[in-house]
Image (cartoon, grey):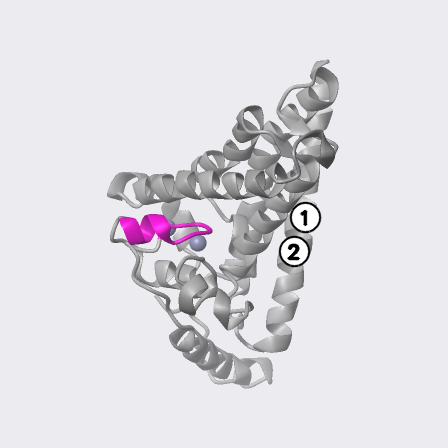
Amino acid sequence: MILAITLSALAMTVIVGVRYLIVSGAFAFATRRRHPGLYTGLDPQMRREIVWSLASAAIYGIPAGIVAWGWQHHGWTQVYENIGDRPLWWAPVSVLLYLLLHDTWFYWTHRWMHRPEPFRIAHALHHASRPPTAWAAMAFHPIEALTGAVVIPLLVFVIPIPVAGLALVLTIMTVMGVTNHMGWEIFPRFMWRGALGGWLITASHHQRHHELYGCNYGLYFRHWDRLCGTDRGIGDFARDHARAAKRALAAAPAAGGGVDGRGGTSRPA
Ligand SMILES: [Zn+2]
Ligand SMILES: [Zn+2]
């Protein structure tokens, strides 16, 4: 039994890790096509982001693997296989509930982690990415990763959700985690401006969190930020992109074999 649980935890860790590498890799590739040079000079930072993200994969994978084992062998959790096992309207409602509750948990734990002491211990690592890249999606200190890792494995015990709904929640979680840190806006304008954009979080909103720190704490939705007066609107990427252009310019002579000893590739503070 111990072996089966260990194997399940291991398998889930590998799944989360590979999923991260594929999704972040795909969006990093898209970034190179769309904004060449945006990540120039950030190689050491991206390596760090990947190492911490893979460590987080284990922290996410272990509880998920244990719960998956219990679901398979002992019928733990409220996850149901056939979408028709409950009224059809419940499927979208359950997905929305998971997103809303995860967002609530994230908002308050994230806001707490911006108090000086918890920030220093658990959250400074995530903000060490300046500016973050598509690889920063899971670049968290183990304590922060743990606060994120327990949410879905606990919710599945309380709120019924079809397997397909759970897959959708995990997909949204992964894609938003990556795109919010990518350094440019991939979603259509209506998702970050206008009536709907005022309530949804995409890269433009989270960019401002990484720029100003004490605001824009939410994950998917803006209602907690707006309700609590911590919403500072959306940022733009002009400054980050200008800095990237400067880095690319500084790196160019070195890459071309130039011999000036300035080595101007240091990251902006
Ligand atoms: Zn933060
Ligand atoms: Zn972030």
Element under disc 1? helix
Question: Residue, x 67% and y 48% (percent of image)?
Answer: 19
Under mark 1, the amino acid is: Arg
Q: Position of residue 254 (x, y in %)?
A: 54, 81
> In which quadrant will I find the C terminus?
bottom left
* Residue position marked by numbered label 2 in the rendering: 23
Is 149 magenta? The answer is: no
Describe residue 47's horizontal placement relative to residue 18 as left or right.
Answer: left
Residues shaded magenta: 217-227
- What is the quadrant of residue 79 in the picture? top right
* Residue position marked by numbered label 1 in the rendering: 19
Q: Is residue 89 visible?
A: yes
Under mark 2, the amino acid is: Val
Is 222 magenta? The answer is: yes
Q: Position of residue 118 (x, y in %)?
A: 31, 39
Cα separation between marks 1 and 2: 6 Å
Residue 49 vertical position relative to residue 82 in the rendered view, above or below: below
| Quadrant of the rendered image holding ligand 2 | bottom left
- The answer to the question of whether label 1 and label 2 lie on touching residues, with beta carbons closer than 8 A, is yes
Between 56 and 92, which is closer to the camera in this rendering? 92
Residue 29 vertical position relative to residue 121 in the rendered view, above or below: below
Residue 148 vertical position relative to residue 226 in the rendered view, above or below: above
